[in-house]
Image: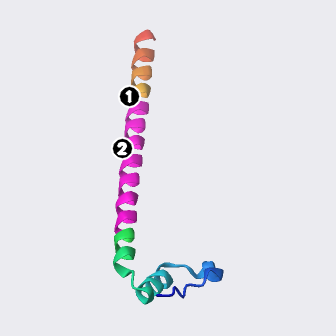
Amino acid sequence: MKCKLSYGKELRWDYQFLRKKCKEVGIEDEFNHHQMRLRANNVYVFQALHVFLTLLHCGLLTATCMILFVHSILN
């Protein structure tokens, strides 16, 4: 089987173009599997960033409250 992909048109490599070309070559299942892995990875990155930023935010709020509490006791 000869691959008919043209690597000179990389600017056109959007989702629909890649899906069509993978279907032509007969590797649509691998393409779908790759897309599912990308989606799962994106969800993991989003959750990790969300947890990190939430903990950072809570830490900053706690530190601010402690500073204000100590300042109010000293005055």
Q: Residue furthest front?
A: 1
Q: In x, y percent, where is residue 44?
A: 36, 53
Judging depth in this view, the residue of 13 and 49 nearest the camera is: 13
Say above or below: 54 vs 19.
above
The residue located at (36%, 58%) in the rendering is: 43
- Nearest the camera: 44 or 30? 30
Please identify the dominant SS of the magenta region.
helix
CA gap, disc 2 and disc 1: 16 Å
Residue at image coords 43%, 22% = 68
Q: In which image quadrant can residue 41 be found?
A: bottom left
Residue corresponding to mark 2: 51
State the residue in front, 15 or 48.
15
Q: Is residue 48 magenta?
A: yes
Label 2 environment density (alpha carbons within 10 Å; few <14, some 14–19, many ≥20): few
The numbered mark at residue 28 is: none
Most distant residue in the right direction: 8
Q: Is residue 25 left or right of residue 12?
A: left
Residue 69 location (% of width, % of height): 39, 19
Q: Amino acid at mark 1?
A: Thr
The residue where tag 1 is placed is 62
At mark 1, the secondary structure is helix
Identify whether 48 is placed above or below 10.
above
Dot 1 alpha-carbon crowd within 10 angstroms: few under 14, some 14 to 19, many 20 or more: few
What kind of residue is marked 2?
Val
Magenta highlight range: 36-62
Residue 3, placed above or below residue 51: below
| Pointer 2 or 1: first along the chain | 2
